[in-house]
Image (cartoon, grey):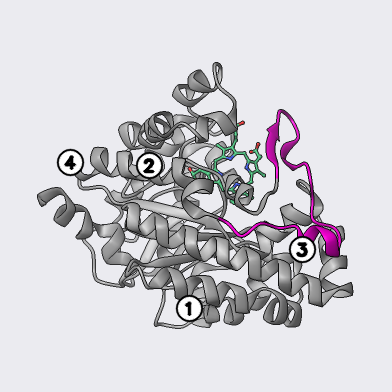
């Protein structure tokens, strides 16, 4: 299939493999979403969860930023929380409050009640959206990224029951009942590993693990309570033969541990200089990042300067994938995204401009 060969040799996948590329590839976390009027239009008539459960609409939203900008990869439109339904957790999105788990996991009975997931039944809508999106993307030679929340970040929502800035209930369970924690993490690891593999089998050409809350852990807690489960899911996902990206935030103090996850690509947030992060992570990895998303809210000269700063830090080394240090913010002007994407592609390292 010609399209398949095209997207497999795309600059994004080449960079994941640390092969030299003609231009630095760029895609953006949360590249589909509320900053785009086309997305807001669809959301007027359908809720977030219902949208994710409609493969045709999920595919359509995945394509919106691809149609609007010269991006090097698409990411399937979904969320990290709906797969938790496979464990028997009831997930919802409430306006103004973000995600909610209505029956959070708080004690031994809750952990024992967790179901063994049927991946197809719990996530089949996203797997179907992946198949649909691949058809659209192949003709354009653009690869598709699948994703999942990492076990620790999913545990945060499962125990806390929703968003939090410090996830104290979760960390209390982890510290106070490590036996229960391990059982919960084993369940999540089975779900995430199976889900990632199923996405690759459905057509995802790279897989990203989002560990948004890993930065809440001390180095020794990360090593004991999160890292082994990341290693297990990445081992499982890697069997599918596609590159795995591990993204976390607030982990500048533990980058050396993050690099032990087994991922091919390490995504870093903006709190660390990209070149320094790369030195600490090591030369055997590709690195993704790491412009502060707030820079997209500012003037073009300032945005351009900051984007150039990221590129200079990467220094043209094979294996840099340009991205933000976290997701696109809702007030981001569409024009800033367009200018950023074009600037990254036009940037020449010799000139250093
Ligand atoms: O990156 C993409 O374009 C793919 C789509 C995607 C979404 N969520 C869509 C979404 C991805 C990869 C995610 C991941 C996700 N979801 C994470 C990890 C990455 C991160 O941002 O740290 C987390 C922690 C979640 C959980 C989640 N989902 C939260 C906390 C929220 C509410 C926050 C907010 O911005 O309102 C969501 C909702 C959500 N997920 C939206 C989108 C586009 C906004 C939904 C809407 O109201 O239309």
- Figure check: 10 above or below 34: below
Q: Any magenta on residue 155?
A: no
160 vs 341, left or right, is right
Comparing 224 with 279, the one in front is: 224
Residue range in magenta is 90-117
256 vs 217, left or right, is left
* Residue bearing mark 3: 112
Q: Position of residue 290 (x, y in %)?
A: 51, 59
Question: Which type of secondary structure does the marked residue at label 4 adopt?
Answer: loop
* Residue bearing mark 1: 262
Can residue 70 be seen at all in this image of the molecule?
Answer: no
How far is disc 3 from disc 1 in space, using C-alphas?
30 Å
Mark closer to the observer (4, 2): 2
* Residue bearing mark 4: 139
* Residue bearing mark 2: 128
Question: Which type of secondary structure does the marked residue at label 2 adopt?
Answer: helix
Mark closer to the observer (4, 3): 3
């Amino acid at each position: 299939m010609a399209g398949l060969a095209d997207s497999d040799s795309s600059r994004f996948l080449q960079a994941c493999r640390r092969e030299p590329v003609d231009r630095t590839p760029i895609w953006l976390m949360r590249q589909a979403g509320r900053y785009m009027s086309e997305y807001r239009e669809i959301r007027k008539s359908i809720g977030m969860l219902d949208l994710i459960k409609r493969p045709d609409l999920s595919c359509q939203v995945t394509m919106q930023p691809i149609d609007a900008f010269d991006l090097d990869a698409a990411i399937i439109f979904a969320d990290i929380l709906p797969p938790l339904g496979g464990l028997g957790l009831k997930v919802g999105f409430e306006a103004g409050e973000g995600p909610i788990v209505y029956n959070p996991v708080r004690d031994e009975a809750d952990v024992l009640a967790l179901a063994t997931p049927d991946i197809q039944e719990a996530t089949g809508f996203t797997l179907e959206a992946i198949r649909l999106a691949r058809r659209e993307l192949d003709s354009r030679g653009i690869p598709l990224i699948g994703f999942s929340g990492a076990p620790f970040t999913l545990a945060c929502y499962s125990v806390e029951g929703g968003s939090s800035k410090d996830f104290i209930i979760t960390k209390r369970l982890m510290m106070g009942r490590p036996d229960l924690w391990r059982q919960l993490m084993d369940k999540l690891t089975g779900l995430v590993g199976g889900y990632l593999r199923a996405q690759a089998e459905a057509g995802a050409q790279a897989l990203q693990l989002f560990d948004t809350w890993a930065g809440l852990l001390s180095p020794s807690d990360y090593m004991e309570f999160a890292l082994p489960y990341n290693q297990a899911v990445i081992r499982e996902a890697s069997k599918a033969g596609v590159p795995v990206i591990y993204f976390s935030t607030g982990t500048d103090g533990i980058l050396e541990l993050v690099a032990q996850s087994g991922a091919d690509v390490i995504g870093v947030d903006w709190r660390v200089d990209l070149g320094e992060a790369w030195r600490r992570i090591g030369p055997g990895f590709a690195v993704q990042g790491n412009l502060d998303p707030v820079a997209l809210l500012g003037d073009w000269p300032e945005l351009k300067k900051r984007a150039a700063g990221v590129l200079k830090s990467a220094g043209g080394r094979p294996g840099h994938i340009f991205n933000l240090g976290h997701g696109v913010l809702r007030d981001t002007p569409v024009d800033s995204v367009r200018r950023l994407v074009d600037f990254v592609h036009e940037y020449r390292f010799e000139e250093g401009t």
